[in-house]
Image: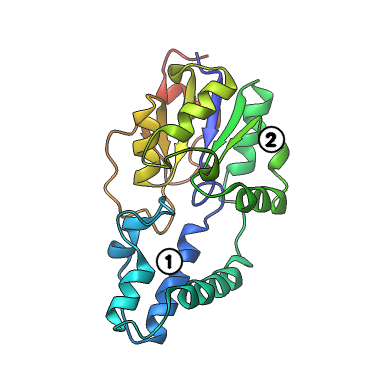
Amino acid sequence: MIKAVIFDCDGLLIDTETPWFLANRELYQEHGVDLPLELYAQCIGNPTFEDFDPYVNLKNQLNGSMEIDEMKAKARLIHKRIMKNQDLRPGVREYLESAKKRGYKIGLASSSDRTWIDEQLTKFNILHYFDSIHTGDTVEKVKPYPDLYLSALKNLEVKPHEAVAFEDSLNGLKAAKAAEIYCVVVPNEATSHLKFTNYDLKLESMQEFTLEQVVKKVIPSST
């Protein structure tokens, strides 16, 4: 029986990931360098850039003529401009409302830091929905490691088989499954081309099915 739902934030509740790709691509293009989505996608869902660092990569291609801090500052300005037009992803508010009405505990597990997460949840007036929030600055290892989800389960006082996670990235999916949680993948524009495997359900949008329908599809015996 499901007792809790745990959401990722960046890219899942709010598509911040596609704007970050667009911001970095624009930064690259200013210097005549291409940034394929397939290459950039390696760092989506992992703010530590463990697999691919777009700024180190650009610095190397520019033979060190531009400092990384300067690149990041420019990318942040571009991202801020693009984010002005962003809203919650379709179906997010309906899922949060449905979870509350059904008595589910609602958690958030994000590799981003708490200040950023609080800013985004407050901006879209959804902070009050969450019973537990776990961010990258509260654990030793972020996604794809399971630390964030294990912390969420402990705080929500539920077992892995009593929770469903919602993710948009490969690192998020790996983290949820490593914690032995059911995982529903809802890719965004930037992650839609990735080869997801081992998920329990994949949606194009949260508007595709209601939360109740999703839970029944993931666990047919759920009521």
Residue at left 30%, top 55%?
Answer: 51
Q: Which residue is mark 1?
A: 21
Q: Residue type at mark 1?
A: Phe
Q: Position of residue 180 (x, y in %)?
A: 37, 24
Q: Quadrant of residue 181?
A: top left
Q: Is 192 or 9 nearer to us in this picture?
A: 9
Q: How many marks?
A: 2
Determine if residue 13 is in view. yes
Which element is circle 1 on? helix
Residue position marked by numbered label 2 in the rendering:
129
Question: Can residue 35 be seen here?
Answer: no
Task: Identify which residue is drawn at 52% across, 55% down.
Answer: 15
- Badge 2 amino acid: Tyr
Q: Are marks 1 and 2 in contact (CB under 8 Å)?
A: no
Q: Quadrant of residue 64?
A: bottom left
Nearest to the observer: residue 107 or residue 55:
55
Percent from the top left, x then y, of residue 52?
Answer: 31, 60
The one nearer the camera, 42 or 202, is 42
Separation (CA) of disc 1 from disc 2: 28 Å
Please state the horizontal and vertical placement of residue 78, each as a whole percent of the image: 54, 74
In the image, what residue occupies the spot 31% across and 83% down? 62
